Image (tube, rainbow, N blue to C red):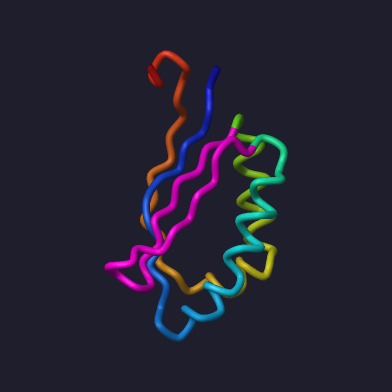
Amino acid sequence: MKKIVLSGHLEVPDRDLDAVRRALPGHVEATRRETGCITFEITEDPAQPGSFVVYEEFSSWEAFEYHQQRAGDSRWGQVAAASQRHYAIEEITADQDA
């Protein structure tokens, strides 16, 4: 089985931080309901306000690409648009997981 994994962090400008924090729970909930979402976690680093650790797993490139499109068009996409993204995206096979 293959899966798409995105990991890294998001740096939110101070001016957008309150809006991002308010939009985050809805974004997480909507993403976790998406077909093909295996794992979706975004947590703010308590030692670095405005820095969010991101970890996502999707069952296929199609599911991942759907998520990217949906998220970009959402309220989350609007409020997080100016954030800097530092991500690695890779395709993992089941034997690499072990």
Q: Is residue 68 above or below residue 97?
A: below
Q: Quadrant of the N terminus?
A: top right
Residue 87, horizontal then vertical, whole percent: 39, 50
Residue 43, horizontal then vertical, whole percent: 44, 58
Residue 69, horizontal then vertical, whole percent: 66, 53
Q: Position of 76 compared to 49: left or right?
A: right
Q: Is residue 45 above or below residue 8?
A: below
Residue 68 belongs to the span the image colors magenta = no
- Magenta span covers which residues? 37-58
Q: Residue at x 38, y 72 (%)?
A: 50
Q: 16 or 84: nearer the eye?
A: 16
Extreme top residue here? 95
Residue 74, horizontal then vertical, whole percent: 69, 65
Extreme front residue here? 46
Residue 44 belongs to the span the image colors magenta = yes
Q: Quadrant of the C terminus?
A: top left
Task: Name the quadrant containing residue 64.
Answer: top right
Main SS of residues in magenta: strand
Q: Residue at x 40, y 45 (%)?
A: 7
Q: Residue at x 50, y 50 (%)?
A: 41
